[in-house]
């Protein structure tokens, strides 16, 4: 089990060129979300054949947003409505920030087999501080998945994408 204070960065060898391309897409979507005045989070789910089956922004921003509408949860739910359990197990969720406990639970319950994220929850907390719209939980997704009955592979944080992931958040939470 990984300590909540020092998430293990992904090995560069573990990432494929396809992973890098999908991560770049997520980072673009996170910036687009910010540019639309929404929280700067995005997630996509890619099936085992390399097809994007869901792309989602965060929609938790008050007053019209719902605090449970995190991008990762929305993308996992959308993928689960389109794919079989077997297809979901072969799928990957990509996101610009480590999934929170709620989103990790959604990934687990939707049977998604792999998560790739750019920036840790701990780094996100350094950017958001105690902002009331992002009450960060210190519960790494690896710890949530470790309590389950099946394995969810996790790659993240990704040093080559961390700085770019942070850019969408700089100045947003102040």
Image (cartoon, helix red, strand yellow):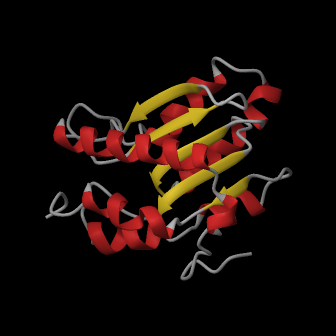
Q: With respect to residue 32, does 3 lie above or below?
A: below
Q: Can I make out residue 107 in this image?
A: yes
Snapshot quadrant of residue 38: top left
* Position of 130 relative to 68 (above/below): below
Percent from the top left, x then y, of residue 62?
22, 40
Total count of labels: 0
In this picture, residue 167 sits left or right of residue 154:
left
Question: Which residue extends farthest front?
Answer: 17
Name which residue lies at 69% across and 61% down.
14
Asked if 173 appears above or below 1 in the picture, the reply is above
Placement of the C terminus among the 4 image quadrants: bottom left
Instruction: Say whether residue 82 is left or right of residue 168.
Output: right
| Quadrant (top left/top right/bottom left/bottom right) for the N terminus | bottom right
Identify the residue at image location x=25%, y=38%: 32
Q: Quadrant of residue 58?
A: top left
Provide residue 157's location: percent of width, then percent of height.
53, 66
Measured as percent of width and height from the top left, residue 77 is found at 58, 29
Q: Nearer the viewer, residue 157 or 161?
A: 161
Towards the viewer: 84 or 15 = 15
Of all residues shown, which one is farthest toward the right? 149
Can you tell which quarter of the image residue 45 is in?
A: top right
Residue ID at (42%, 40%): 25
Residue 137 visible somewhere in the drawing: no
The location of residue 119, given as percent across then percent down, is 45, 64
């Amino acid at each position: 089990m990984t300590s909540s204070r020092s998430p293990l960065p992904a090995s560069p060898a573990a990432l494929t060129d396809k992973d890098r391309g999908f991560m770049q897409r997520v980072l673009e979507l996170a910036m687009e979300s910010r540019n639309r005045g929404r929280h700067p989070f995005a997630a996509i789910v890619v099936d085992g054949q390399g097809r994007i089956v869901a792309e989602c922004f965060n929609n938790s921003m008050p007053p019209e947003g719902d605090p449970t509408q995190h991008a990762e949860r929305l993308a996992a739910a959308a993928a689960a409505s389109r794919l079989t359990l077997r297809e979901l197990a072969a799928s990957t969720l990509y996101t610009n920030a480590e999934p929170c406990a709620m989103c990790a639970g959604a990934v687990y319950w939707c049977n998604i087999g792999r998560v790739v994220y750019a920036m840790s929850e701990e780094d996100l907390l350094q950017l958001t501080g105690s902002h009331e719209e992002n009450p960060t939980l210190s519960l790494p997704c690896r710890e949530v998945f470790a309590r389950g009955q099946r394995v969810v592979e996790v790659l993240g944080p990704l040093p080559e994408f961390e700085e770019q992931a942070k850019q969408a958040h700089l100045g947003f939470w102040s």
